[in-house]
Image (tube, rainbow, N blue to C red):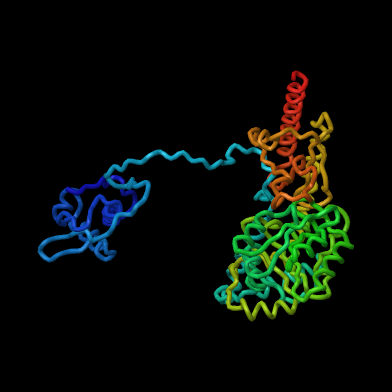
Amino acid sequence: MLTYDISKRGNRPMYEFLSHCIRQDILQGILTSEQKLPSKRMFAKNLGVSVVTVDSCYAQLIDEGYIYSKERKGFFVAKIKPLKINEQKNPSCSHSIKNESVHSTVHTDEHILYDFSSSQSSASDFPFSVWVRLLRKILSDRQEKLIKQLDVSGTYQLRAAIATHIRGFRGINVNEHQIIVGAGAEYLYGLLIQLFGFDKKYGFENPGYRKLWAIYKNFGIKCAPIPIDEKGVKIQFLKQENIDIMHVSPSHHFPTGTVMAADRRVELLDWAYSSPNRYIIEDDYDSEFRFSGNPIPSLQSMDKGERVIYINTFSQTLFSSIRISYMVLPESLEKKFRQILGFYSCTVSSIEQLTLAQFISDGFFERHINRQRKNALLKRDAFIHSLQKYDEKKQIHVLNADSGLYFLVKIKNCPKDFKKILFHSGIKINSLQEYFFEETPHSHPDRENIFIANCSSLKQDEIEQAVKILCQKYNEATSASRFVYEFA
């Protein structure tokens, strides 16, 4: 007699629990094709449930095609092949299926105490009370706008707020219709690939953002790493590689922190102007966090030939999960964009867009950026002061720390596998080595001795403790190496 442990049904209705168990037994081959099921009355009596429950269970399975009925003969399993899977288990029912234990080889970061690889800010850094108040007001006052379908550009209110912001902060004079809002920069890159076509060759700063490289490669796009120096991307390699579209982050390069020099910017624009199909994608990552002087002008603000596409995101300045980014298209490209891709709908909800628009227009965004910039500066200083306190050998130095959420840390005579040593001590930090796309003769000579430190997710007191451990592990590793050398 077919039976199940009804004590495991949880909060589900009894008929749903029974139909689930029978369905799983059919898919796993425990109940085979054409096998007769017990009558409703006998099944109900055996389980101690009502006939109505069993009737509802069988009716559901008949509707789904798992069983069928024959008049005056009963209920039978339909002709369904069992699912071929490595592990078959039906934990909610009475049948016991052998289940081999699986040991996961996926490495987790649960033991990490101090993460210098994360750009995720603390929840206490964002004014959620203000955001919630604005959100409630939007839900109350803008209900008609919330139910309207959005075109590919996004809401007018957010695009207008962005235009005003970048005009004052980045010197970019554009109209609202040139701005396209999307759910993350990755989505916008995908739109640009479709806009330009799949036959173009893209150049990427080397070292650079590996995820960006992976996105384009996943689309089957031809890509080439372009080396950089202290002035920025080397223009001669763009010509050697026959690049059509170049990705750059001129105001604060990731991960080196390099600011592209003015003469190199002019060279780059001249390169784009020398052919009608060349474009530059400017990723203005981290430009808001300059600690002294005026913000570095954007490359787009210098462009007089409509060849620069400006991209920025609110994921760094607000919080990483908000996933709102935008790009500014030249007038000529904006018209082409609407002709080719205008059928898309915007991927960011109107509720979030209208809330962010109000957040910017009411001045909260600028005040938040000022607070974040101050916090980033305090965290950088905490790192430097902690180094001065605990680096007795004075072998660890901070580089390019004048702006941004991250900076470089150069370690002289860096021990082999030092990243692993720190990882096992609860510190996660990435090396410059990891951001090179491939081996080239133009790589940074000290890349294995340089690390990228992002303090966004850490508190100031945590930074001191992390630096203390870093210095201790460096001293231990170098002392051990010297001992082995002297002993040998």
Q: Residue at x 56, y 41 (%)?
A: 108
Question: 359 left or right of 12?
Answer: right
Question: 215 left or right of 274?
Answer: left
Q: Position of residue 45 (x, y in %)?
A: 15, 50
Q: Position of residue 423 (x, y in %)?
A: 65, 36
Which of the two residues, 299 or 450, is positioned nearer the viewer here? 450
Q: Residue at x 81, y 65 (%)?
A: 298
Q: Residue at x 27, y 51 (%)?
A: 29
User: In this orientation, does residue 364 appear?
Assistant: no
Q: Residue at x 65, y 67 (%)?
A: 188
Question: 217 left or right of 85?
Answer: right
Q: Residue at the top extreme?
A: 487
Q: Position of residue 152 (x, y in %)?
A: 62, 74
Q: Residue at the left extreme?
A: 72
The C terminus lies in quadrant = top right
Q: Position of residue 266 (x, y in %)?
A: 87, 66
User: In this orientation, does residue 270 appear?
Assistant: yes
Residue 146 lies in quadrant:
bottom right
Which of the two residues, 70 or 325, is positioned nearer the viewer here? 70
Residue 314 lies in quadrant:
bottom right
Which of the two residues, 259 or 234, is positioned nearer the viewer here? 234
- In this figure, what is the number of numbered marks? 0
Which of the two residues, 252 or 195, is positioned nearer the viewer here? 195
Residue 365 lies in quadrant:
bottom right
